[in-house]
Image: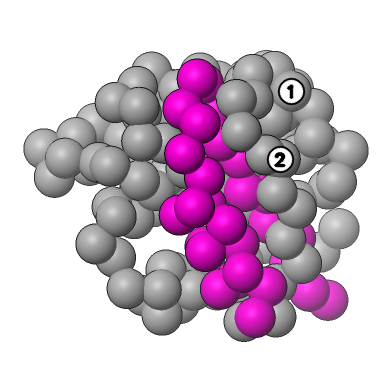
Amino acid sequence: MTARILVAKPGLDGHDRGAKIVARALRDAGFEVIYTGIRQKVEDIVSIALQEDVAVVGLSILSGAHVALTTRTVEALREADAGDIAVIVGGTIPQADVPKLLEAGAAAVFPTSTPLDVLVTGVRKLTENAAPA
């Protein structure tokens, strides 16, 4: 069974080239990818994740609000009884914020300089242990 991945752009950030590149790399690697488009509310991301029965929610954040948006997304998934959905974060992430994101509940963090093959390998490892839908 192919793992389903939701790539989402939370908040007001309107730049989505990186998210589209990531979505395509994951699709090309064999994942089923759902892309939300820009300026999504956390509540809508969680709703889509539940409707689409995804294994991973990938947040693409360039706005600087990565810690707050990740925390809110993880908490909203837990409140929806979907805490088993892994949340990964990518974008403009200062190295000093990586531990904060992991502490907030992110399963993995992929700053803008992350090679696509490293990202794909990381997502593959996360989804290997996911329970089948």
- SS class of the residue under badge 2? loop
Contact flag, marks 2 and 1 (Cβ < 8 Å)? yes
Q: Residue at x 61, y 69 (%)?
A: 24
Q: Residue at x 62, y 81 (%)?
A: 29
Circle 2: residue type: Thr
In the displayed structure, does residue 7 sit left or right of residue 87? right
| Residue at mark 1 | 44
Q: Residue at x 69, y 30 (%)?
A: 45
Residues in magenta, as a range: 1-28
Circle 1: residue type: Asp
In the displayed structure, does residue 11 sit left or right of residue 32? left
Residue 11 is inside the magenta segment? yes
| Image quadrant in which the N terminus is located | bottom right
Instruction: Give how far across and how far down residue 64 sits, in percent.
Output: 29, 26
In the orientation shown, which residue stands out farthest toward the left?
96
Q: Which mark is residue 66?
A: none
| Residue at mark 2 | 36
Q: Quadrant of residue 2?
A: bottom right
According to the image, what is the colour scheme of the structure? one colour
